[in-house]
Amino acid sequence: MLLHMCMVWSSSVIFLQGGSVLCKEMKLPSRAAKPPSPSDFLDKLMGRTSGYDARIRPNFKGPPVNVTCNLFINSFGSITETTMDYRLNVFLRQQWNDPRLAYKEYPDDSLDLDPSMLDSIWKPDLFFANEKGANFHEVTTDNKLLRIFQNGNVLYSIRLTLTLSCPMDLKNFPMDSQMCIMQLESFGYTMNDLIFEWLDIGAVQVADDLTLPQFVLNEEIGLGYCTKQYNTGKFTCIEVKFYLERQMGYYLIQMYIPSLLTVILSWVSFWINMDAAPARVGLGITTVLTMTTQSSGSRASLPKVSYVKAIDIWMAVCLLFVFAALLEYAAVNFVSRQHKEFFRLRKKLKEQQQRQRTGSGDSKAKGNNTSGNSAPHGNVAQQCSVCSREEELAQQGLLFQSFGIALSAGSAPEMDATPVFADLPPGLGFYEIRRRFVDRAKRIDTISRAVFPMSFLMFNVLYWLTYKVLRYEDLQAAQ
């Protein structure tokens, strides 16, 4: 029996079948090292056995760590003028390189880790310099992302709801444009250890369906640096500027149009008969109170600033027009009733002159029966009272001197001064004089019907031209 032997170096198997020997060559699997389990890998990478210390920054005592930041604005909340702040929901993403976390043992290019691992690595001490309040989101779990790459790059993303201060210039309110700033700054590391910088492409992204109730967020967003110098050192700081333009549709419907209609309503009194005092006075007082209420309502949602706003000028002028319409009826009513005062004063003057004649005759008769040194005290008091009434009537008569109307036919020549009512001839009757005064009052109403609307129209042209065109161009140039 022939025995055939086959020898194959380290990779042969010999099979004996009957009297024959079969040599079959087989390839044995290579003895390559198996990848470690994820738990073992993480323990070796950043666990206690790895020697990683989260208290020490990367490149300790070396060059500063460059942290690249970018934002995704998920929602832009309410903008409050009274507290001068705004609220927004963002995804804050930071990326830096930590050579201690570079790996080659694991086949994946990147590892998405549980947020609890954040406590095991070093993180930048970023904070928002103009923050008033902030909230983390923990429903249903912590809204945080930690991703580590093979080259040691670390991506840290977190969802935040922020309330940030936004100093506002409300001189043009409600036709204003505001610029709100978000500042990201390092709290404890100076620029020798840490530097923040914006991502080159897509540093600030905005959700496609983002809408604001009163403002329009301009697509142009300003990115910049705001390095801070304190007593403790120079700290890195980056900022983003949001340009917001207010939509005045709400204020047009709730403030401008109602106040405009209130002013027009006050002009209705010019067409109401001047004898209808309750109607005209009631209309005037109602419009004044309405404008006062609207003016107070417009200031309720605004801070107590020391400068004048555009809405303040509008409300003040509307209130002035409404109040002037009420005073106009006071002037009309006063002029229309002057004929009564005229005849009342003339009647008093005639009675006073008659008493003077009677008193002078009695004093002469009594003077013949008594000596000149024994004049009774009663006559002296009566004469003094007569003198005081004469002075009062003379002062009241000055009003009618200006009208060119003499209180009596025997008035002094100096009372016929150049008058406003020079066309009143002497010797007019009661009804004629009354008609002349009433015509003057009606003329005031007639003039007011044209003067008030034209004045208000001129004010509107100047107002809207100033705030919608000139001031708007100045603001755009400043930005």
Image (cartoon, helix red, strand yellow):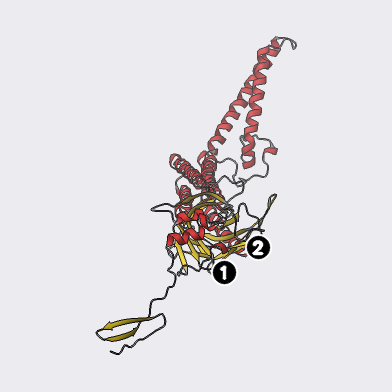
Residue 408 to residue 136: above or below: above
Residue 360 in view here? no
| Dot 1 crowding, Cα within 10 Å, few <14, some 14–19, many 20+ | few
Residue 337 appears in the picture as rendered: yes
Residue drawn at x 24%, y 84% as measured from the top left: 18
Q: Position of residue 10 (x, y in %)?
A: 41, 80
**Does dot 1 land on a helix, a strand or a loop?**
loop
On the image, the x and y values in percent for residue 132 come to 54, 48
Q: Nearer the viewer, residue 94 or 123?
A: 123
Which secondary structure, mark 2? Answer: loop
Residue 99 falls in which quadrant of the image?
bottom right
Q: Residue at label 2?
A: 63
State which mark lies toward you, 1 or 2.
Answer: 2
Q: Residue reaching furthest right?
A: 373
- Image position of 203 (left or right of 361): left
Quarter of the image with the C terminus in it: bottom right
Please tell me in which quadrant of the rendered image residue 97 appears: bottom right
Count of numbered labels shown in the rendering: 2
Residue type beneath disc 2: Pro
> Which image quadrant: the N terminus?
bottom left
Q: Residue furthest left?
A: 18
Residue position for label 1:
200
The percent position of residue 89, horizontal first and vertical second, equals: 47, 56
